[in-house]
Image: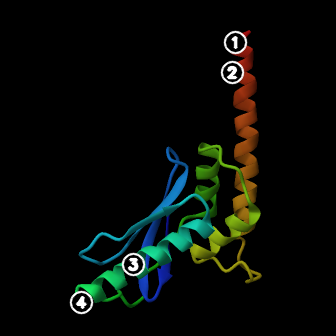
């Protein structure tokens, strides 16, 4: 799963690690590596802000010119269906507020009456849950 965040004009790509069960990110278009992580969206945002602030402070201390933030339009969008698939695949607990936040970070406008991303996420999630339940029943029958 990939998405982006922005802070002080800098953009970062956000990914999810199912193995580590956390989000992680990297600030884009800098020579220096600026990475951050978090297990919740709020923790991820705080970590991003802190990492970028630390980078800018270090540049000032070392009289180094920080990387110039990229400008222009850049859009990375994960489909609501793919997002639901990732949550099911990694057996993640669902928090509707965090799902909404991730959809907004992915440039969906949940307040727009024509935006069906929330409905698409939950419809796909429920379908995947049903398929998972059927798979469990089949596995139980094989075990008997």
**In screen coordinates, is 94 left or right of 21?**
right
Give the mark, 3 or 1, whose residue is nearer the N terminus: 3
Q: Residue at 76% of width from left, 40% of height from top?
A: 130
Q: Nearer the viewer, mark 4 or mark 2?
A: 4
Question: Which residue corresponds to mark 3?
Answer: 54
State the quadrant of the C terminus. top right
Q: Secondary structure at mark 4?
A: loop
**Label 3, label 1: how far apart the Cα atoms are:** 55 Å
**Label 1, label 2: how far apart the Cα atoms are:** 6 Å
Given residues 115 and 98, the one toward you in this image is 98
Question: Which residue corresponds to mark 4?
Answer: 65
Given residues 48 and 16, the one toward you in this image is 48
- Residue 67 in view of the camera: no
Which mark, by number, is residue 143?
Answer: 1
User: x, y (%) of residue 20?
Assistant: 50, 47
- Look at the numbered discs 1 and 4 and tell me whether their residues touch, using CB distance below 8 Å: no
Q: Is residue 92 placed above or below 95 in the rendered structure?
A: above
Give the mark, 4 or 2, whose residue is nearer the N terminus: 4
**Label 1, label 4: how far apart the Cα atoms are:** 64 Å
């Amino acid at each position: 799963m990939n998405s982006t965040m922005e802070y002080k004009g800098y953009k970062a790509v956000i990914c999810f690690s199912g193995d580590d069960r956390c989000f992680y990110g990297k600030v884009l278009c800098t020579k220096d590596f600026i990475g951050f992580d978090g297990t919740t969206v709020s923790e991820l945002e705080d970590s991003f802000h802190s990492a970028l602030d630390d980078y800018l402070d270090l540049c000032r201390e070392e009289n180094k010119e920080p990387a110039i933030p990229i400008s222009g339009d850049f859009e990375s969008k994960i489909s609501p269906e793919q997002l639901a698939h990732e949550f099911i695949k990694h057996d993640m607990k669902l928090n509707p507020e965090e799902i909404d936040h991730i959809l907004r970070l992915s440039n969906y406008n949940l307040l727009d009456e024509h935006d069906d991303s929330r409905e698409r996420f939950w419809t796909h999630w429920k379908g995947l849950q049903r398929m998972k339940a059927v798979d469990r029943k089949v596995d139980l029958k094989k075990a008997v």
